[in-house]
Image (cartoon, rainbow, N blue to C red):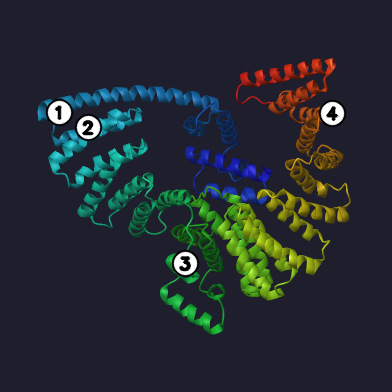
Amino acid sequence: MPEAQSKTSSRKRIGDLLLKAGVIKPEHLPHGLAEADKFQLRLGEMLVMLRFMSTEDLTNVLQAQSMLDAGTIDEDTAVAALRQASIDHLDLEDAMDRVKELEQNSLESKKSLVTKINEQIAEKEKILGPNNRELVGLFMDLGDVHIELGQSGEAEKAFKKALMISESSFGKSNLKVTTSLFRLIDLYLKHNKIAEAEPLGWRLVQISQESLGAEHLETGLAFQRMARILEASSRFVEAEQFYLSALRIKEKKLGPDHPDLVDQLRQMANFWSKQGRKSEKKRIGDILCDAGLLTTAQLNEAAQQAQKQGLPLGQYLLSLDTLNPDVVRAGLQAQLLIGDGVVPYELGIKAIRICAKKNIPLDESLEFIGWRAESLSTRELKALVGEADQLITAERTLGANHCGVAIICMRLGDNYLDQKRFPEAEANYKRALGILEKFFGPKDAEVATCLYKMAELFFKQQKFAEAESYIWRTLEIQQQALGSDHVDVATTLELLADGKTKQSNPEQAEMFYKTALGIKEKLYGPDSPKLVSILEKSADNFANQGKSEESVELYVRVAKIRQKRGDKQPLEVATVLDKLGRLYLKKGEASAAVEQFEIALEVLESHHGQVHPDVASALERLAGALRKTGSAASNDKANEMEARAKQIRTHLASAPKNEGTGA
């Protein structure tokens, strides 16, 4: 994993811990992340510099993270300890002791409370009877305490009793029944008892609508519960409608910028993230109108003026003094991300509104409302938004069909391809291809570059027939425009050979590898590190065909080139030497195999240390080769190698999981 990427995942974890513990506020995290990225610092360091938390808080959260990674504490304990440490200014270990002490005291007090409530229930039942309405509140309290004690079965009994008394006292459709329904539904959802929760959910929705109306906040809460039930049942279309209804009720009653909406948005973000992203083509004007930043009258006027001046609507809106250009730009970025399926439409609208209110960029706004697409990191989102911004600028200044727009589309395609978001990558590559063919002509080298990207796209999807059609078109243009001995021709031939290998056609693969290798040898010389990849793939192809002589020759070249480069890629050197050793064994040349396995073992020991599973495997392979030489000395040495391997495996099997495997 690259360093920058590992920092991102670490940041997210520290940020989440600090948020859950209440050490920092929700608005601190996006600000801290943005500043940390800007100055290339770790998130914790930046939060301290911004005075959002203390150095003691940083020390504690890093220690908590380390303990979580080691598996010595769970997340709930870490969060509770961090919260207590921040409140009482303690170090983490003292805070953990304090949390245990408080939990023990709390446990005893809760058990005493259960006894007290049961006594009150018994007393009232004796005086008023077992089904009196005054018992409802007591049974609800009893259920709540049982939940805090982790006694879900007892809690369910208490809530059911409260529901039964409410129904007999007030009627099954009375609004007072809903309190018990809410409690039971939440309990069932927590323990994944969806079949039990669903009929209660429908009752809750019906009673709330009939008693309060479809636009009441309590009805919105009922819609939320129903959405969660349907989501848990994998009925995502129905769930989405209930989620959206709940969101719109809250927006209407509280206003679009109310703080309570953030939790609702995060719930929606989590839902959409799990279901995959939607792709919706929307006009920039409609997006800004739906976000409440442009009226319908303003949109109609802008559309007419843009048409008169022959400008795209987005470009015209950017020129208006009445609209903040940063907000319009955020809208255009959101339009692209919504259209490409990165962000769901409803969420994009809310993000633009927050951009306008808080005066922050779109990526920070999306992060603030909790958009966490599983395959999309914060850094990748920033890259996409950055590419979108460049595309907007290029379209505005150069026109929609300029080659500069095509280049940015290709970069966007590359970005999507890296994330394995193939439909979005294909759409951007195809747009770039259409522009380049018109701008330069269909036989230009730039067109070939885009065709090659299309070939790679289909190759990664294992659609080899489609990939090959683009490869042949690429080759035809490259050979005409660049000449048959150009490095790009060799790279394309190599991709073609890779495809033939994947399709189990080693003879054709051999031919294309040979041609590509000849071009690269001519350009770089026979010992260039730039030959390593194609030499190794050619050697693998020969080995798969049983052509040991040819394969050995190429592996020897690869090993020499890699060893000449020093220790920059030690594991790759060991891999090649291991392949060579195996081939020598197949040829019956045990002594030559021993020589390769010995060097491979030396490389692995220098990289991993003396105690590592890969070292044990290398010792076992070396022992096998030594025995095949047939000499008594070699047999003794083989016994020694096998004993070492066994000792390593025994040590690793008995070592704690978090113990390192180095020397």
Q: Is residue 626 left or right of residue 470?
A: right
* Pair 4/3: label in front: 4
Q: Are marks 1 and 3 in contact (CB under 8 Å)?
A: no
* Pair 4/1: label in front: 4
- Is 45 in front, or is 342? 342
Mark 4 / mark 1, whichever is N-terminal:
1
Specify the amino acid type for callout 3. Ile
* Pair 1/3: label in front: 3
Q: Quadrant of residue 392?
A: bottom right
Q: Which mark is residue 217?
A: none
Q: Are marks 2 and 1 in contact (CB under 8 Å)?
A: yes
Q: Which mark is residue 287?
A: 3
Specify the amino acid type for callout 2. Leu
* Pair 4/2: label in front: 4
Residue pointed to by mark 4: 595
Where does the image place residue 646, in percent across and percent down from the top left?
A: 69, 18
Instruction: Give the position of the C terminus as an image quadrant.
Output: top right
User: Can residue 663 be spotted in the picture?
Assistant: no
Classed neighbour count for the residue bearing mark 2: other residues with Cα under 10 Å, few (<14), some (14–19), many (≥20): some
Q: Which mark is residue 124?
A: 1
Q: CA distance from mark 4 to mark 1?
A: 89 Å
Q: Secondary structure at mark 2?
A: helix
